Image (cartoon, coloured by chain):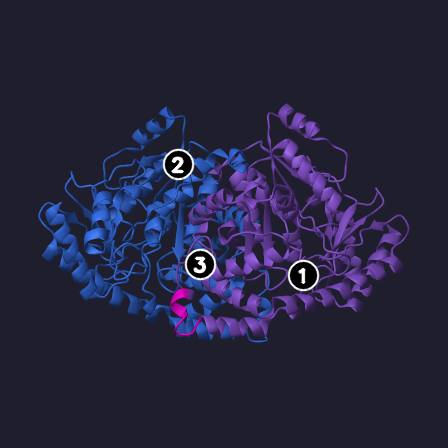
Chain colours: A blue, B purple
Amino acid sequence: MLLQQLFASRTQRMKASEIRELLKLLNRPGLLSFAGGIPDPALFPAAEFSAAFQDCLTPERQSEALQYSLSEGYLPLREWIRGEMARMGVVCDVDNILITSGSQQALDYLGKLFLSPNDTALVGWPTYLGALAAFNAYEPRYDQLNPGGNRSALSYRQAAEAAGSQVKFAYLSPDFANPTGQTLSQQDRDALLDLSEDLGCAIVEDGAYQALRYDGDQIPSILGLEIARRGDLELCRTIYCGSFSKTLSPGLRLGWVVAAKPVIAQMVLMKQAADLHSATLNQMAVHQVAERCFETHVAQLRQAYGNRRDAMLAALQSHMPQGITWTRPEGGMFVWLTLPAHIDAAALLVRALDEENIAFVPGQAFFADGNGANTLRLSFSVLAPEAIHSGVERLGRLLQQA
Amino acid sequence: MLLQQLFASRTQRMKASEIRELLKLLNRPGLLSFAGGIPDPALFPAAEFSAAFQDCLTPERQSEALQYSLSEGYLPLREWIRGEMARMGVVCDVDNILITSGSQQALDYLGKLFLSPNDTALVGWPTYLGALAAFNAYEPRYDQLNPGGNRSALSYRQAAEAAGSQVKFAYLSPDFANPTGQTLSQQDRDALLDLSEDLGCAIVEDGAYQALRYDGDQIPSILGLEIARRGDLELCRTIYCGSFSKTLSPGLRLGWVVAAKPVIAQMVLMKQAADLHSATLNQMAVHQVAERCFETHVAQLRQAYGNRRDAMLAALQSHMPQGITWTRPEGGMFVWLTLPAHIDAAALLVRALDEENIAFVPGQAFFADGNGANTLRLSFSVLAPEAIHSGVERLGRLLQQA
């Protein structure tokens, strides 16, 4: 094909994702899937959205709802987010907030903002593979972020310099991360702030799952801790990415970024050039639904997903053979399994689909260094507790033969 | 600010746009604005959208409407677009179509797909400034696309080679272009296809205003002409960008790209990494509204906007002093004025706001080479004919003193 010869070099880093290919299998009859990291559609606040979209399309409001709007986002929604961030200990102004088309877009824009080819991004081994996909378009190198580990700023700097590179940011999801479900302790968050100060790099804090805590005490966000430390968001290096995808609806594609004003101002210019603004009507409807039922709706989600998390942990306890370990998430949607070193999770998936009609995500795609062949991710978000028990039992049977 | 030191070099090419700053003035009481290039909200098919959003949020459909969906876009909408493209003479498959969040996003993605720093994009002097903004993020150089002019492929290639560059694509809006309102003749479209073949570069055809023709015969799209020439879309170098912003609603942010399958496949990967997909509900609602009333609604738009175009051309004829020339668009939303060389349109705007409370867009921002200080863009899309007459009369008064 002629045009492919004209593609920019960055396209070589854009590969089909394993999760995406897997999602195509989700319609197999009877498949019991732990693969998707998606919210349960039965729990969407659909009646509230139906009412909200009607209210936004009345004759008084339809001209605004269907028209172009500001790249920064719908002001009442940014004001609602300001209130929500304040409840999390992040005091900010509406000018510190940009509405994005999901937090995935925020990750793309942050890659675009910071990363020139060969710049370094620190990411977990494993990390959210959508973050790797977003950053890859800007051709970075990666180094391993290991909060709680003992690697010094100096060692990161030396590794970057040896590669002719500079560390631009550390990316992580500190609460119930995708894929591991793990949460960073406050001590490790503080250590990460120290590291970013020593390295002179930014921190990209992905709060996509932050609202979905099922037990344990909430830990302040990294941005909240940094504001407490420096006294003012304008002095902070942390950029917080929030999302309505896991709380209200992923299909409406709305998230937000909170950061110092010069960062937001630059990202507003970027968004203006890249897609003008996120859908006006969706912002108005999400604002209305958030105003009316965010707290009570999220409480319902926590109850439902928490029960499923409990079911999965109990089933793993009952059905996993020896030699297999897993995380015990306090929230989110995922449990992460580490298999004995000789078991390849991708090969296991083929057998799981064939022999047990179950699906999961092999872990290797979440590793920027290509390791993790003996890991896998299970999502408990869309299945009833009985299905979770049945699926984990089948997985255990398979692993006993592996 | 600490973080600004970490920004990638591409951010230096992202500047605030003149149009954007101007839009902030639109709420001035009594302002008569020819500035915005926006559809008239009174003409939105709001009742149809209200019904469509309700229909998409019934219990049977809400789970799909509010959930994640495929990066390619909602299949029934892509099927509708396939039919619409076929009516334009572009026979394609749904796998030749990607749904984007407005055609602005298509321009960003095409920059990302093709442009490495210092690659050459051919653009009109002037051209759509949002295209320049989108491409600027990828740090290209520009050369002047002048269809109908006599510049040879060799001269473009030599200019690029002298700059250590390669021509990747030519960008243009062949029908009623923003900002000039001008339409490319079929002969010039054929010559452009010859040029792209000689240069081995792509053509990005921006069809944002294509449906809004008020008189004259429709000219086949560049992609349609190329398919006729080569016999198969898969052999074509032209990439067509369509939009629902000017026909149904800009606030819902939906557009599309039609191209050979390897191009679409690469752009799907890009979209997956950049924002996963465009809002599911919006795609479903736009599909329903397009199915039910696209043709009749667009016919109404053509009638209304055509009357305003007529009013503006008549008013210009009546009120412009000698030495001022303007385009006579067969469609779209814009008339382009060229003033005597000594008049600076940006300075004129300051006086226009102060003395006559009217606004327009000075033309310089549309020129990649910084020329065009004596040009300006008038939009007739949101004003009643009487307001157009009054505003043009005031502009004429101002120009008589300039």
Residue B43, position in %: x, y? 66, 69
Residue A153, position in %: x, y? 31, 33
Disc 1 designates what residue? B26
Disc 2 designates what residue? A200
Going by the numbered disc 2, the residue's amino acid type is Gly
Disc 3 designates what residue? A253
Going by the numbered disc 3, the residue's amino acid type is Arg
- Residue B203 versus residue A221: which sits nearer the camera? B203
Give the crowd class for mark 3: few <14, some 14-19, many >=20 residues within 10 Å: many
* Real-space Cα separation, disc 3 to disc 1, in angstroms: 28 Å
Q: Nearer the viewer, mark 2 or mark 3?
A: 3
* Real-space Cα separation, disc 1 to disc 2, in angstroms: 42 Å
Extreme residue toward the left, this view: A322
Say above or below: B140 vs B239.
above
Q: Chain of mark 2?
A: A
**Chief secondary structure of the magenta span?**
loop
Q: Tell me if I can see residue B42 in this picture.
A: yes
**What residue sits 53% from the left and 47% below the top?**
A270
Q: Quadrant of residue B341?
A: top right
